[in-house]
Amino acid sequence: MKEVKMNAPALPLTISFQGDASLGAVRNALRAHGTRQLLIRYDGQLIQGGYHVTEVKAGSFVTLDCGGNPDAWQETILQVEDLPASAEKPEHMEVGKFLAILGKVAERVSLQEDGRLTFEVGPPGRPMQVFDVEAIRIESTRVVIELGPRPAICKPRHRAEQEAAKGNACCTPQSGCC
């Protein structure tokens, strides 16, 4: 009997993102899975089957942090309303439909593939919450985008802590650079 080698990855497969996930990285991770259902996990729960992408925003931000340092970046913000399944929409949307929505928006709005991707998610009548993409989990019949909370940070202190961890402690939280 001849041995057959398969090149398909074993499922489930988790793609983790270090730092900020970009729109392009998420789209690339989803592209090969068009017929699977797309679920979103946020705040410890799975999104309901009738969820709706209500808005896609292309943002360009120019900021000044608390240490007087300027910063600038591009961001795509997906606003998602968490709705229950209905008779017209009994299941979660497929990955292909989600990608088609992003494609349709990209025809009219300049979305930066290398820009940060942010999700704003919430049920009707409640404030939406801001999330970052932490991972994408590919399963046999579905794909789950795992969202994590976006914390507020003091960028100068955060940079100083990163430098101190590398052994470059020229600026520490105690040095007054914040």
Image (cartoon, rainbow, N blue to C red):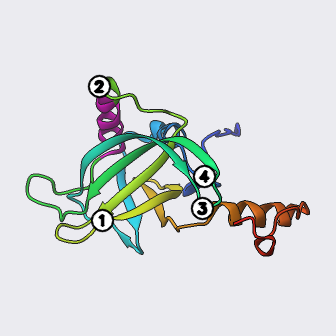
Where residue 63 sits: x, y (%)? 52, 48
For discs 3 and 4, the disc positioned in front in the rendered view? 3
Above-or-below relation of 1 to 66: above
Magenta residues, start to end: 94-105
Seen in the image, is 136 located left or right of residue 76? right
Q: Kindly report the distance in space between the C-alpha atoms of the residues bearing marks 4 and 1.
A: 35 Å
Amino acid type of the residue tagged 2 in the rendering: Arg
Residue position for label 2: 108
Above-or-below relation of 57 to 141: above
Is residue 101 part of the magenta span, yes or no?
A: yes
For discs 3 and 1, the disc positioned in front in the rendered view? 3
Residue shown at the point (52%, 39%) measured from the top left: 115
Q: Kindly report the distance in space between the C-alpha atoms of the residues bearing marks 2 and 1.
A: 25 Å
Residue position for label 3: 66
Residue shown at the point (61%, 66%) measured from the top left: 154
Q: Earlier in the sequence, mark 2 or mark 4?
A: 4
Q: Are marks 3 and 1 in contact (CB under 8 Å)?
A: no
The residue tagged with tag 1: helix, strand or loop? loop
